[in-house]
Amino acid sequence: VTDVIAQLKDLFTHCRIDRSSARSNRFEEEPKEIEVSKDFEFTYSPEISIDWYRKNTFLYRKLNSTLRVQDVELLYLFRFFIRDTSKQLEQNRCRSTVRVFRGQFMSKKEVEMLEKSIGEFVSISSFYSTSINREVAQKFLNED
């Protein structure tokens, strides 16, 4: 689904309507989040989508949740961001193998499923934040 959405063409040149909808679709009404969402609405551009994804904001949290549950309505709403981020990742991808680390809590069932998939193709329905530094990845385990 993410790949299909990444290829969608927008009807609006800069997708202002959808960006505004994505911003107003946030669940937190904290003053800081409102300020960040307004900043997003007025400063976002496709060239900085990864920078916005890396920030711990409503966008990061809502997009990750949407990708995990595959909420089609919200996936469509975030299509501009999914497309921009996919394109930016492809343009900046590593040309050689790099070992990276990710800190993430998983259920026993998820771990067992991954263990059964060793050597197989595994499909991931979201963007993964990773680090080349194991300690940085481990810090994410302490944030929750």
Image (cartoon, helix red, strand yellow):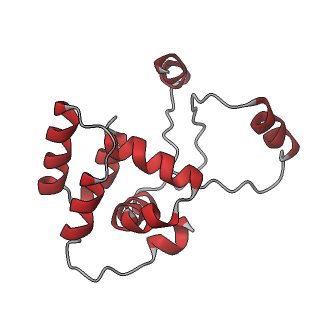
Count of number-bearing discs: 0
Give 142 or 24, whichever is nearer the viewer: 24
- Residue 46 seen in the current view: no
Whether 4 is drawn above or below 58: the answer is below
State the residue at coordinates (31%, 53%): 25
- Residue lying at 42% horizontally and 69% vertically, measured from the top left: 76
Which x, y percent locates residue 9?
A: 36, 81
Quadrant showing the N terminus: bottom right
Residue located at (20% from left, 72% from top): 14
Q: Is residue 79 left or right of residue 96?
A: left
Front residue of 2/23: it is: 23
Query: Residue 141: image x %, image y %?
Result: 55, 21
Query: Does residue 43 appear to the left or right of 2 in the view shown?
Result: left
Residue 67 image position (x, y, % from top left):
52, 54
Is residue 137 or residue 2 the one in the foreground? 2
In x, y percent, where is residue 109? 80, 36
Q: Is residue 134 above or below residue 69?
A: above
Q: Nearer the viewer, residue 121 or 66?
A: 66
> Quick check: can you spot residue 118?
yes
- Is 82 located above or below residue 69 in the figure? below
Q: Is 108 located above or below residue 35 in the figure? A: above
> Which residue is rendered at x = 63% and y = 53% of the image?
124
